[in-house]
Amino acid sequence: MPRVVVDVMPKPEILDPQGKAVQGALPRLGFSGVLDVRQGKRFELEVAEVSDAVLADVHRMAETLLSNPVIESFTVRVEDGQPA
Amino acid sequence: MPRVVVDVMPKPEILDPQGKAVQGALPRLGFSGVLDVRQGKRFELEVAEVSDAVLADVHRMAETLLSNPVIESFTVRVEDGQPA
């Protein structure tokens, strides 16, 4: 079954407290070398078939339901049906 | 700056209430054709350079901090530095 992935991330200019919290924890766990961390959401939508109409629908879902366009940006891409 | 992306998703056998909530809302918003929705987390880690050691570190971060291995699985991949 084809899968459409919607990745929703905070816009670069928006403060990302979750990302900052993760970044702050890394040195305490002995990790170094990570300059920045941003955390967002990943949606995997299983669809019967992939067509321009379905992708247009997914874009509208992303704009209206899956993301907050004021503070988030999203990307839509088709992935093969393999489990992530 | 190279970026490493960690995608964390609920394991297939684990109930995904957030995904079910989104799936339930789609028909009410006039969307059809989506058979299943799963929601997870996406982390973008900016690193100074990508090496085997850095990727091994990121895997350990994913196992210990970014995911709960009991109910979640994760994938790690390198992305070019373009904004998502």
Image (tube, coloured by chain):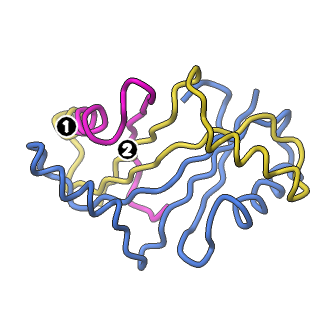
Chain colours: A yellow, B blue
Q: Which residue is mark 2?
A: A78
Q: Give the chain letter at badge 2.
A: A
Rendered residue at 61%/46% (across/down) = B43
- Amino acid type, label 1: Asp
Q: Earlier in the sequence, mark 1 or mark 2?
A: 1
Q: Give the chain letter at badge 1.
A: A
The disc placed on residue A57 is 1
- Residue in the foreground of this view, choosing between B29 and B33: B29
Rendered residue at 37%/68% (across/down) = B16
Task: Give the mark toward the camera: 1 or 2.
Answer: 1
Q: CA distance from mark 1 to mark 2?
A: 13 Å
Magenta residues, start to end: A58-84
Classify mark 1: helix, strand or loop. Answer: helix
- Amino acid type, label 2: Val
Indicate yes or no whether the magenta region holds residue A76.
yes
Classify mark 2: helix, strand or loop. Answer: strand
Which percent across, then down, holds residue B10? 47, 67
**In the rendered view, would you say B80 is above or below A27?**
above
